[in-house]
Image (cartoon, rainbow, N blue to C red):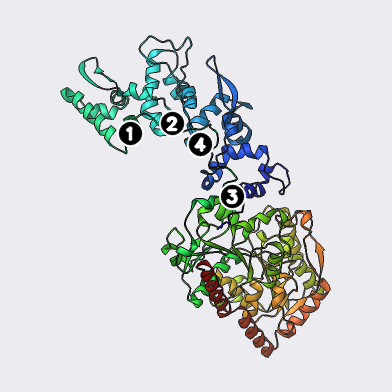
Amino acid sequence: MLPSNSVSYKALARQFIWSLRPDIRSGAPVADLPNESFDKWWGIFGRSEYPAWSDSNADTSSLAELGPVISIDGVQIQFPRAIDLVLEHRPDVLKIFSVNGKVDVIAVAAWFFVFGIKELQLQKFVNEDLVRLLDRPIMNDAFRAGDGVPALTILMRLVWQLMGAQQKTAMPLNNSASRQKLITWFFCNAVKNYDLSYLLSSRWRQWLLQDIEISSDVEEMAPRFIVMEYNNSSELQKRLRGEHKGRDLNALAKLHLASDKSHWTWLRAPVANKPIISASPANETDEVNETSATTDSPANKPFGVNLFGFAYGELGIGEDLRMAVAACEAANIAYRVINVDAGSTLRQADQILKDQVEEADKKAPYAVNIFCMPIFDIVSRVFLSRGAGVFEGHYNIAWAPWELSVWPKAWKNSFSLFDEVWAGSPFSLEMYRKSTLKPSSLMPLVVSVDRLNRCSRSHFGLPAKPFLYLYIFDFNSHLERKNPQAAILAFQAAFPNKSDDELGLVLKVMNSKQEDAEWLQFVAQCKLDPRIVLINQTMDRGEILGLIEVCDAYVSPHRAEGFGRTLAEAMLLGKPLVATNFSGNASFMHPEYTLPVNYELRPLSEGDYHFIEKSDQASWANPSIEHMKEQLLMARQFAQDSNRLQQLKNYAQSEFGVQRTADLLKGRMRQIYAQLHA
C-alpha cells in the first residue's frame, strides 16, 4: 500500500534488480542509479527474467533503433537494435550458433524472431514495420518470380536457417519445386510449431484462403491452406480418397476455421500485429504511482492475516513462519499460509503446514499481509517474482530478521514496500527504528520443541560416553558470521588434551558447498582433533531437536544473530547455553540462567556480509576465546545442577512461549484494523 507521494512500484523494481544483479551492474556501486547499459538490458531482457513486471517494462526506445546490417543471400537487411542486444547479452545463444569461434549472425537473427521474441516476452511489441521487414521477398537468381510460386520472405528464409542439415538438403532454395515444398512446410508445420502467425503479413491470409484446384486429376476447388495440408500429410491422404475428396476437404477447411483449437484459426481475420519496437505508452512512466490505478482497499477485506514465508523450508526462517501460524491460532486470528519457494538449493520437506498451504486459494483474502522472511527475500522472491499486486490493497508488514545493528544504506528503499516493520528481538527493533521512519514494533518470535523426536546418540553416530558440546549452523548464513572456528579454539583451550575421550564437540552444519575453499579449510581444521564430530547434512525438524537433546550443552560463538532460534531451543530443552552476548540473543542471555560470552566489536570489511558496503560502517562481535573457554568449563558444572536446569527451562518458557506473542499479535492487529476503518 504505497503512499501517494512515494516512488512507483516500477521504479522500485528497477532499483532492486540493479541492487541484486552485480552481473548487470558490471562493477558499478549498488548505491548508483541504473545506468544506460541497464536500461538497454531492462528493455529487452527484463520481461523474460522478471515476467511479473512485463507490463510495466515499457522502455523500448533502445529496441527501436536500427541496428546491424545482415546480408542474406546477397540482400542487405538492416535489423532492429534488438539483435545487437542479443549478441551482447546472450552468450548462450552465441555459443549455440558459433562454428570455430565465428558467430553465424543469420542464425542468431533467426533465433531471435522464431524463439527469442516469445522467450523475452516481446510479442505485444511487434508492429507493422517489423512485419513488413520480415515479409520482404528474397529476390535473387535462385528465387525468380513468374513461375507461379511466391518468392520466399525473410521470415521463411530465417526459419530455413534453423533447420537441420537433412531438412535443408530435402528443401534446397535453388528451384521452384523445392521452394513450393518449403512454403508448404512453413505454413503447415513451422507456423503451427513455432506460433509464428503474429509475424505474418495479412496478404498471406488472403493467399491461403484462395480457392484452388485440389489436383490435376480432380476439378473440384478447395481453399489453398487445406490443399497444402492435404499434400503435406500422408495420413490425410490415406483418409480422404475417392470421388468425395473435394467435398471432404472443404468440410475439413470449415472445421479448421470454426475450431478455436485449430492452428489455422488465425486465418479467420487479418492478423492484429502489436508493436515490438515502439515508444513507451504515455501511461507507463516512472513518475506514475501504480497504486492510483486500484480502488481496492484493505479496509474492504476481512479481518485476518495472509502469512507469506517458506512453509516447507527446513531452516530457521521456515520455522519463523510455522511459529507465526501457532501464534495466530493461539490468538484466534484468521490466517492463510502462502508458501514462497525457498530455492532449489534448499531442502523443502517440512510438511507440518501442508494442509493449510494446499487448502489456500492463490489470492490473499485478508486485510493484512505479514511476510515472515528477510526483507531481501521479500524483495526477490515475492515482489520481483510475483509483482506489485501482492502488496496492493493490503496493509503490509515485514516480520523480518536482520543480524547487524545497521541497515545497508543502498537498501533503504526496501522499506517502501511495507506499512510497518516487526522485529523479533529488541536488537533488531533498535536497528529498524534507526533505519526507517515506518512504524516499528517488537513482536517476539515463538519457539517450540513440541516436535522433538527422541533419538539415541548412536542414531547420529555420536559416542555414548563423552560430555558433548553442540553447535548448529547453516553454511549459507556465512561462516564468518557463524564463526564455528571460535568454538573449536575455545574447546581446545578449555580441554587441551586431544586424547581425552570424556569430551566432544559436535558441529552440525547444512548447505555446505563441497568445493568451497573456505569449507574445505574448515573440514581440515576439524579433522585435526579426533574429539570433533562434524555432521554435514540437513535433518528434519524432530531430528534436529533430538540432536540437541542428546548433547549436554550448546555453544554459539556467533558474531551476530537476528534472534538465535537454536539457542532458544537448547534452553527449552534444558541445555546450558554458552553464547556470544551480542545481537538478537543478548535480550535472553540472563546471567542466572545462561553463560554469556564477552566480546569486542570490530568493523566489517566490504564483502564480509551480503549487501554491506564500507559506507554502512557496520560492526559485529569478536567473542573472547579466553572467556568462552571459562564458560565452557562452567557449563559442565551447570549440567550437573538439576535445580538450575529446571529454572532454565522455566525461564525459557516465559521468554519464548506462544501466548506472549499471541496476545501482542492480537492487540496490534486490532489496532491496525481500527486504523484502517477510521
Decide: is 205 above or below 560: above
Q: Name the element at disc 4.
A: loop
Front one among 541 and 589: 589
Q: Position of residue 170 (x, y in %)?
A: 42, 20
Ranked by sequence position, the earlier of labels 3 and 4 is: 3
Q: Residues within 10 Å of mark 4 (few under 14, many from 20)?
A: many
Residue 273 numbered mark, or none: 2
Q: Nearer the viewer, mark 3 or mark 2?
A: 3
Tell me which amino acid carries mark 3: Ser
Q: Nearer the viewer, mark 3 or mark 1?
A: 3
Separation of disc 3 and disc 2 at Cα? 30 Å
Q: Residues within 10 Å of mark 2 (few under 14, many from 20)?
A: many
**Mark 3 and mark 1: Cα distance apart in space:** 40 Å
Q: Which residue type does callout 1 highlight?
A: Thr
Q: Position of residue 617 (x, y in %)?
A: 79, 59
Viewer-nearest residue: 449 or 151: 151
Residue, far bottom: 643
Residue at the spot x=62%, y=47% of the render? Answer: 17
Read off the residue under disc 1.
265
Dots 3 and 1: beta carbons under 8 Å? no
Disc 3: which residue: 8
Mark 4 highlights which residue? Answer: 122
